[in-house]
Image (cartoon, rainbow, N blue to C red):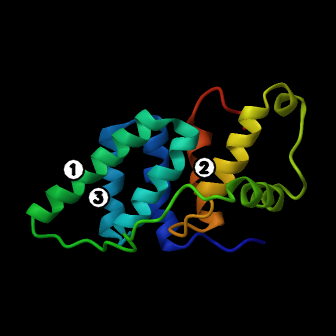
Amino acid sequence: MSSPLNPLQRAFIPIAVATALGDMPQLDQAIEQGLNQQLPISIAKEVMVHLYAYVGFPRSLNALNTLLTVVKRRKEQGIIDVEGDSSPTPTLQADSLRVGTANQTALVGQPVTGELFEFCPAIDQLLKAHLFGDLFQRPQLSWRDRELSTLCALSVMSVVSSQ
């Protein structure tokens, strides 16, 4: 039996869902609720950064702009939110392909291969190096939190059931 969700996970799930849907009014509310529950701004940012690989840059950028707007509004209202770890994290690593291949294999339980990756090796390299390498090396979210936000996002998106 797996452990229940912690308070931070419960706070970022609605943010992941609204980001995936591109629903900015819903996202505004989810951010407000999350920040009220002491969700660090840095965690909300990282969920949105992580999800760009699944929902695209436009939705992630819109989500980040919504987060920025909410944070500014709350600051003007005198609300002081938890910042969290906002130190810059390098995204591109020299050994991202090696690390990403190892991360993907660990997550799936075996090496990932298949006809699609033979047909288009570029997508295999990008998945391994960038998604499972560069993004999964970032310390702001645990692997479990990354997988949880991904699952929440994909579950509300249409036409991605195979993912």
Number of numbered callouts drawn? 3
- Location of residue 127 by image quarter: top right
Q: Is residue 123 left or right of residue 76?
A: right
Instruction: Tell me the distance, in whole angstroms, between the alpha carbons under discs 1 and 2.
Output: 24 Å
Instruction: Tell me the distance, in whole angstroms, between the alpha carbons under discs 3 and 1.
Output: 11 Å
Mark 3 / mark 1, whichever is N-terminal:
3
Q: Nearer the viewer, residue 25 or 87?
A: 87
* Numbered badge on residue 69: 1
Q: Are marks 1 and 2 in contact (CB under 8 Å)?
A: no
Residue 35 in percent (x, y) is at 32, 65
- Location of residue 93 by image quarter: bottom right
The residue located at (60%, 56%) in the rendering is 134
Residue 137 in percent (x, y) is at 61, 64
**Placement of the N terminus among the 4 image quadrants:** bottom right
Q: Are marks 3 and 1 in contact (CB under 8 Å)?
A: no
In this rendering, the label closer to the viewer, 2 or 3: 2
* Numbered badge on residue 32: 3
Instruction: Tell me the distance, in whole angstroms, between the alpha carbons under discs 2 and 3.
Output: 21 Å
Q: Secondary structure at mark 3?
A: helix
Q: Residue type at mark 1?
A: Thr
Q: Is residue 54 left or right of residue 39?
A: right
Label 2, residues with CA under 10 Å away: few <14, some 14-19, many ≥20: many
Residue 107 in percent (x, y) is at 78, 59
Q: Which residue is mark 2?
A: 150
Q: Residue type at mark 3?
A: Glu
The residue located at (58%, 56%) in the rendering is 135
